[in-house]
Image (cartoon, rainbow, N blue to C red):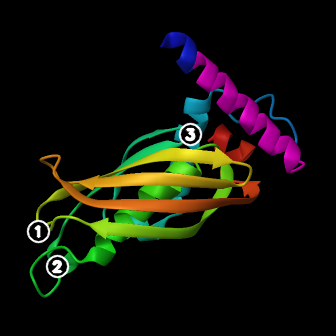
Amino acid sequence: MQARAEASLRADAENQAGLAAEEGLPAQSGQGALPEDPQALAELTARVMYARDPASQAQGMRIEQVAPGRSAMSMTVRDYMLNGHQTCHGGFIFTLADSAFAFACNSRNAVTVASGATIDFVAPAFEGDVLTAYAEETSLAGRTGVYDIRVENQDAKLIAMFRGRSYRIKGQVATQADAAD
């Protein structure tokens, strides 16, 4: 298990180096350099993204965890998020899942956008529920990826299943200046 985890980390680092070279970005070194460790890079990228993400902030979303190709985000269902049935409006659940998707697919510091998404709502959420969206990379090939996101309540009850498709574009989320902060 340890050998497989180490191989995965090496592959992530090689993938990141390849992305930088492919986009004509300079190698990172010296003070303020981007982290070489994939986990540290994912954490830096998440901090930078969240600071520039007023949509997630406005809904009170919190980053619970991030790793290369993965993230977990949570939010509490508030009264203004309720629909006419007094359950959480599906748009807010979609937004939570979409944000977790964004943090997972950008976790390697390559700017990545959604190319499509679907969601299945399987149970209602209510005011006061704490929803957590768990995003996991299912496939990453070339510039495209597929991510599956489970949205659960505080009792680990499944609320929704979301599948997002990503497309990597040019650029990096975090820069050397961000790493120096």
Q: Residues within 10 Å of mark 3 (few under 14, many from 20)?
A: many
From the image, tell me which residue sits under label 3.
Answer: 42
In the image shown, does 31 or 136 lie closer to the viewer?
Answer: 136
Report if the CB atoms under discs 1 and 3 are less than 8 Å apart. Answer: no
From the image, tell me which residue sits under label 1.
Answer: 127
In the image shown, does 8 or 60 lie closer to the viewer?
Answer: 8
Left or right, 52 with reference to 180: left
| Image x and y of residue 151, in percent | 29, 56
**Local SS, label 2:** loop
Left or right, 170 with reference to 101: right
Left or right, 74 with reference to 114: left
Tell me the amino acid under the disc marked 3: Ala
Q: Earlier in the sequence, mark 3 or mark 2?
A: 3
| 126 in magenta | no
| Image x and y of residue 36, in percent | 69, 28
Report if the CB atoms under discs 3 and 2 are less than 8 Å apart. Answer: no
Tell me the amino acid under the disc marked 1: Glu
Res 12 quadrant in image: top right
Q: Which residues are magenta?
A: 6-25
Report if the CB atoms under discs 1 and 2 are less than 8 Å apart. Answer: yes
Q: CA distance from mark 3 to mark 2?
A: 33 Å
Residue at 54% from the left image edge and 20% from the top image edge: 5
Q: Residues within 10 Å of mark 1 (few under 14, many from 20)?
A: some
Q: CA distance from mark 1 to mark 3?
A: 32 Å
From the image, tell me which residue sits under label 2.
Answer: 82
**Local SS, label 3:** helix
Q: Which mark is residue 11?
A: none
Q: Earlier in the sequence, mark 1 or mark 2?
A: 2
